[in-house]
Image (tube, coloured by chain):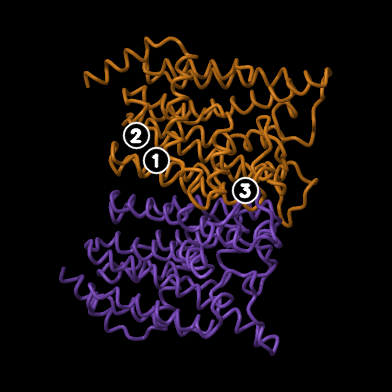
Chain colours: A purple, B orange
């Protein structure tokens, strides 16, 4: 308890947010290098493809959320690395599959060819599948420190967040919302729902569900009391939605800067900027970030770093 | 203990193998109907696609292995249904992804259009992903009966069996072996290995790994002692390989019956019949089945049903 309190004090004193993000990001990168099979082990091509997509310069937001919520309870970030890396692998798998020709058909991501361009479509499908499986193998490894009960709760939490009630369901809603450019035999959106509601549901499922699960997982491992876990759940939900909105705002702004003129709203895109415009989207993201911070009230000073992270994510420029 | 012994006696006395397979298959079918989200819940199309592929008349071999090995230790089959259904969902997800145009490009399976033909390629990718995630959610549900330690061991066991060391790795080897019809930038098979070894490795990973994990999972949940678990591991491995060989033999024989003439060996196919011919493949399958039965020796009479199942799988005609 004494040790946990000391950790908490040092965390609160740790005011350099940028340095927090950099050091934790390095922990995750190093751990991912250890956890992923070597690129040289057979069949090499799949391990190369997995590493190519995992080490593509992602921001490690989801692992950061696992670590920061565990650290709020005095748990060392190193201890939760298997779960922190697992949510990063899951995020990467979802990007690989989203980029496929049959889905978003994206040829570039983060300035590099996407996985299916670099390794072929078959290997890209399988690299995603392998990362998905490896994530659940990694999660199980957390039991050495946290015991089987908490670890299994986290495994269930994350599995639930990425199925049709969460990440995959959001992706399906997204595809349907961007129809009729595509054909989905029998696929329809819930009828008579305003686009503003649909876009919220898409991003709550597609992005916020895994971010919320990441926040909750760190707290579950660290043994957070139920009322604080409720606060963290709301925090993860609002932060996750705000994160996606800011992402889509930055996309539009970046595109406009490149073109040297406003792109206008793209009605075929189910994003906040497309539906609400840039200015209103910025307001909504700020409101959600406020709600995320407010939800940390039950944590008191423990919640400081999580609140600082929410503020940083709102004002980031990349 | 008394109850467990009674169950064992009734199991051994239960000589009607066909009836065993039918009753257990019904248990699995009913449970899958309960565990899968209703086809009517939004987004409906993905739940329809998942159900379409899960209820396609599969033989439920993997769930049967989970139940039979648990029953060998007196555990009621109903108790292991979450895990039995999970391995069936994983098998189904792998078939959906294998059938994709970028992979095996199969338009029909079990006499019906494949998932991507019926629902579009994007939904097929996502239906596979959703079944994969749901499997790990289901597995966690076994903790209510078996406790978190055994349940987590099973979750790790299955995750390990379906990654690049197992199912996905086998699929990658398979794709590479059937090259150069396809292009895999940088993808090569381990050099200078005879095709007979390669084909064994492909099917050991692609098929036997999940079957072995299914056998082991039932036994782990039921608390099998280590030496018997070792026997079951070998049983699952040899049975899984024999199963795939018989499957490929039946394919060739079925094709010949349809054409009214021998198809000859298809050198582009990495199967036992293509590499060894039909007669030698039958011998190998029989040898492997013998090894599988022998591996059950440590179980004594407990192993009777598993041995009977191995015999049945060798001599099946569909």
Q: From what the image shows, is residue B63 above or below residue A264?
A: above
Mark 3, residue position: A186
Disc count in the image? 3
- Whole-angstrom CA distance, mark 1 to mark 2, is 7 Å
Q: Picture coordinates of residue A193 (x, y %)?
A: 51, 63
Q: What is the chain letter for disc 1?
A: B
Question: Is residue A81 something that shows in the picture?
Answer: yes
Say what secondary structure mark 1 lies in. Answer: helix
The answer to whether dots 2 and 3 both sit on one chain is no
Q: Residue at x 46, y 27 (%)?
A: B65
Q: Tell me whether the residue at label 1 lies in contact with that at label 2, contact meaning CB atoms closer than 8 angstroms.
A: yes
Mark 1, residue position: B154
Say what secondary structure mark 3 lies in. Answer: loop
Q: Residue furthest left?
A: A2
Q: Residue furthest bottom?
A: A260
Whichever of callouts 1 and 2 sits on the residue coming sooner in the sequence is: 1
Q: Picture coordinates of residue B68 (x, y %)?
A: 42, 24
The answer to whether dots 1 and 2 both sit on one chain is yes
Q: From what the image shows, is residue B284 above or below residue B66?
A: above
- Residue A232 in which image quadrant: bottom left
- Whole-angstrom CA distance, mark 2 to mark 3, is 40 Å
Kindly identify which numbered label has been placed on residue B221. 2
Q: What is the chain letter for disc 3?
A: A
Q: What is the chain letter for disc 2?
A: B
């Amino acid at each position: 308890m004494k040790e946990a309190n000391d950790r908490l004090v040092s965390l609160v004193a740790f005011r350099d947010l940028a340095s927090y993000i950099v050091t934790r990001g390095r922990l995750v990168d190093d751990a991912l290098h250890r956890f992923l099979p070597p690129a040289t082990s057979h069949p090499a091509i799949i391990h190369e493809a997995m590493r190519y997509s995992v080490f593509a310069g992602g921001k490690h937001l989801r692992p950061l959320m696992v670590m920061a919520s565990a650290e709020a309870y005095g748990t060392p970030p190193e201890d939760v690395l298997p779960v922190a890396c697992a949510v990063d692998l899951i995020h990467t798998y979802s990007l690989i599959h989203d980029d496929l020709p049959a889905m978003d058909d994206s040829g570039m991501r983060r300035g590099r060819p996407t996985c299916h361009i670099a390794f072929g479509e078959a290997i890209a499908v399988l690299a995603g599948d392998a990362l998905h499986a490896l994530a659940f193998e990694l999660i199980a490894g957390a039991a050495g420190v946290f015991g089987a009960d908490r670890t299994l709760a986290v495994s269930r939490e994350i599995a639930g967040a990425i199925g049709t009630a969460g990440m995959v369901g959001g992706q399906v809603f997204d595809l349907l919302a961007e129809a009729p450019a595509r054909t989905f035999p029998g696929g329809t959106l819930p009828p008579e729902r305003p686009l503003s509601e649909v876009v919220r549901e898409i991003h709550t499922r597609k992005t916020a569900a895994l971010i919320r699960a990441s926040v909750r997982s760190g707290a579950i491992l660290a043994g957070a009391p139920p009322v604080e876990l409720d606060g963290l759940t709301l925090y993860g939900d609002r932060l996750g939605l705000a994160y996606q909105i800011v992402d889509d705002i930055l996309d539009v702004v970046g595109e406009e800067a490149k073109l040297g003129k406003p792109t206008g709203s793209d009605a075929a895109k189910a994003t906040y900027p497309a539906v609400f415009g840039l200015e209103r989207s910025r307001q909504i993201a700020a409101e959600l970030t406020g709600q995320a911070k407010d939800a940390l009230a039950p944590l008191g000073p423990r919640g400081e770093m999580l609140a600082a992270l929410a503020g940083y994510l709102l004002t980031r420029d990349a």
